[in-house]
Amino acid sequence: MTATTTRRADTGSGTPHVGLLFGGLMLVMLLASLNQTVLSTAMPTIVGELDGVTHMLWVITAYILASTIMMPIYGKLGDLIGRRPLLLAAIALFMVGSVVGALAGGMTALIVARAIQGLGGGGLIILSQATIADVVPARERGKYMGVMGAVFAVSSVAGPLLGGWFTEGPGWRWAFWINVPLGIAAAAGAVFLLKLPRPRGRVRLDIGGMILLAVATTCLVLAASWGGHTYAWSDPVILGLIAGTVVAAVTFVAVERRAAEPILPMHLFAEPNFNFTTVAGLLIGVGMFGAIGYMPTYLQMTFGVDATESGLLMIPMMGTMLVTSTVTGQLVTRTGRYKWMPISGSLILAVGLVLLSTLTADMGVWHVCLYVGVIGLGLGMSMQILVLVVQNTFPLREVGTATASNNYFRQIGATLGSALVGSIFTSRLASLLVERLPAEAVESVGGGADSLTPAMVAGLPDAIRQPIIESYNDALTPIYLWIAPLGLVAAVLLCFVKEMPLATSLDDEQVPQAAVEGNLLVQADMVEEDAEARGPRAEAVRGGTADR
């Protein structure tokens, strides 16, 4: 017998007004989304001060890896034991990681801090998205998901701006300290605003699945990060990591088929819509993080702008993403149509990546603004809609698991995108610097290439500065062209998505398709006494009780 979940379709009796609840969730989303971008403008200064340019990709990858591993765990546990206690635990972990990062004295401590942040951050976004699904039907959920996408858009610029301001003002460590008051505010919102029904029943943890998922994910990311850079692709270390990924993944599938409460249920993959949107989300994740993860660093080192200016130059992406995410969410709620949106968004993302690949060091910065604006346009039309499609495919009792599973694979794409682009970028940069600069010229600036900062490069003689600028440009821009086809593949896959009607009540989402065809829907405005009067079968449909 699985855990029995009892949920209400209305927003009374134990659930606050949806507007207040949504406000609390926005605080949580802001905390998570700001953290993904706030270090981007501060990164060149951080790694320069801590002598760790070659380890720069791990500051980003450590967070993404940890949060990716935790996503399915948070999603499943949220369905089993309730979302609010998990949300508070995630916020607490995130704040601990922030304090460790603020006090970090070296790259190792900084990377550990980011990993701790990721352990909490993996639950912030997932639990927020799943909580909205608890109280808002899919047809109405579009406008809320659109606003959630808008929060990411605002954070994509507010984060780099804050990071730049901290770097040039009180110091980059405040990019971590700022999370403490934000975390306290988010925790207060969770305590006072998120009053949701809690599942009842015995909880069975899929410990084996959790461990195997962590092993497979870690091996995959390490192989992508080290391959072709730290180790050759034919090196035994890389081959061993690839073999470990395959073995852990195969074993994971076997364990999940037998688990009482699998962390990643295999029956999810029986739904074509889940498969198409999940693979497309993975590809979009590669393109998104591959495009924006290193853009502020590129702008500072190539165009000579300061940290704050590099954040301001990302405003066009925020603007287009903000508008398209909000407008498409409203259109979904108004029309019930959504399939064309992520298809168009994927194609536009591919165009934006091609445009970024044409950047050169002697072009005007308005080119950068225009091209990142195109990227934002594509992302705003696709990211939140894909989550909505997945949530509309499964019954409400599984919405946390389904949402987390979809986001897990999208984060795998983000991890691979960040790791692969970072690995190729740093490898190409090191090679180009060796080719274009005498070794003594780099060593003479103090600490070698690992210690190069934007301010240091700006003060170098032209004979040294210009080759460094050109090396940064030539190391990064061709990579954008290499990953642009991923947007085209995502668009093709999304053409096969079946546009199912969006549920107009919470009870609709709890009923499998077979029950819908049998006219066994329970209306959202029915009180529990009416459900009980309909007999055991109606009560089972309403309460989401299932025997396995």
Image: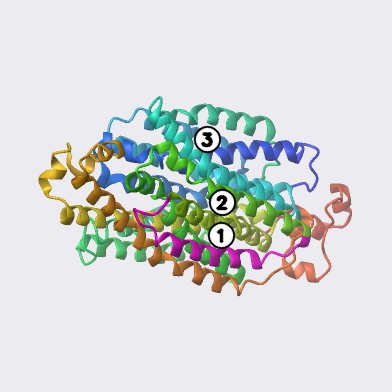
In the rendered view, tell whether residue 135 sits above or below residue 185. Answer: below
Q: Which one is earlier in the sequence, the residue at label 1 or at label 2?
A: 2
Which-is-in-front pick, marks 1 and 2? 1
Q: Position of residue 453 (x, y in %)?
A: 28, 39
Q: Which amino acid does label 3 sit on?
A: Ile
Apparent side of residue 141 relative to residue 73 in the rendered image (left or right): right
Q: What residue type is labelled 2?
A: Lys
According to the image, label 3 marks what residue? 91
Nearer to us in this view, 34 or 272: 34
- Inspect this view and state whether residue 119 appears: no
CA gap between label 1 and label 2 equals 30 Å
CA gap between label 3 and label 2 equals 18 Å
According to the image, label 2 marks what residue? 76
Which-is-in-front pick, marks 1 and 3? 1
According to the image, label 1 marks what residue? 378
- Is mark 3 in CB contact (under 8 Å) with mark 2? no
Nearer to us in this view, 422 or 119: 422
Bounds of the magenta span?
A: 335-364
Q: Which one is earlier in the sequence, the residue at label 3 or at label 2?
A: 2
Apparent side of residue 268 relative to residue 308 in the rendered image (left or right): right
Q: Position of residue 249 (x, y in %)?
A: 40, 63
- Is 379 covered by the magenta stretch? no
Q: Which one is earlier in the sequence, the residue at label 1 or at label 3?
A: 3
Name which quarter of the figure residue 305 lies in. Answer: top left
Identify the secondary structure beneath mark 2.
Answer: helix
Q: What residue type is labelled 1?
A: Gly
Q: Counting other residues with Cα less than 10 Å from the Cα at mark 2, is it few (<14), some (14-19), or many (20 or more)?
A: many
